[in-house]
Amino acid sequence: MIGRHWFSRFESFYVQGVKSGALIRHWSPSGLRSLIAFSPAPGTLVANEQETWYESDILAWTKFRYRTHGDNSEIEVRRDPLLHQNCVPGYTEILLVERLLASGEDCAEFSVLFESELGHPLHSATLTKTGRAAAARPSKHLDPKDITIELAVDGTTTNRHHARSGVVISSDWGGARSYLAPDFDSACSGLPTQVRQVLQEFTP
């Protein structure tokens, strides 16, 4: 397990407009830990956890571990030295979004390795700043100055991230949505007990 974390990011997770779970990320000197846990229907639980090891640059990641809580399955993948230099695991997308926001560039191209598709070919991916978020997708959560960054995988747009002052404040995940929360309690308030318990175990 990646060591003691530097800082954390908490997001409320919504399915069909209903708060159903949370997305939590912990950064440390040695990498990134992520957990998405939600209940798509009463009495159900979806929870996937991912850890990626890297030092100063996500493009230089060395391995990742992926765990699904439902069947308690776990895989660990060490990077093949021959793997494309700009290839990253899917759960580290946020790091490339932040890099693009800080760079001043309009787009970034890379390859993505989806944790649930091991053994399949890599996918080509592009992150693109598409302009002002509120103009493209009117919402009470967005300000006219907010920026949208779109992820296209193999030419098809899959995710959208909305940023304010260089910080991602919300994301569209192909139907589901997440919103930045100030802390653990705000992100997890009102969630079913089984969902909150998984999230609590992940957060020291």
Image (cartoon, rainbow, N blue to C red):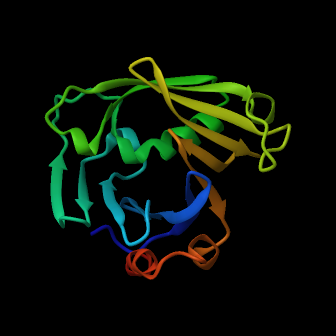
- Could you say which quadrant of the image residue 10 lies in? bottom right
Left of 7 or right of it: where is 70? left
Q: Is 193 situated above or below 10?
A: below
Quadrant for residue 148, please give it: top right
Q: Does the rendering let one see residue 57?
A: no
> Residue at the top extreme?
155
Q: Residue placed farthest to the front in the image?
A: 42
Q: Position of residue 44 (x, y in %)?
A: 36, 67
Count of marks overlaid on the render: 0
Instruction: For the C terminus, give its image quadrant.
Output: bottom left
Q: In this view, does 196 lie above or below 39?
A: below
Give residue 197's position: percent from left, percent from top: 41, 81
For the point 16% across and 54% down, the residue is: 76
Front residue of 114 and 137: 137
Taking depth in this image into account, of 158 and 53 the one nearest to the observer is: 158
Query: Of 19 and 58, which appears nearest the observer?
Result: 19
Which residue is depicted at the point 39% across and 79% down?
A: 194
Does the image show residue 172? Answer: yes
Q: Position of residue 18 (x, y in %)?
A: 59, 60
Residue 188 in picture, x, y percent from top left: 56, 74
Q: In this view, does 143 lie above or below 111?
A: below
Residue drawn at (24%, 60%) of the image: 67
Quadrant assignment for the N terminus: bottom left
Residue drawn at x 49%, y 45% as measured from the top left = 95
Quarter of the rendering containing residue 121: top left
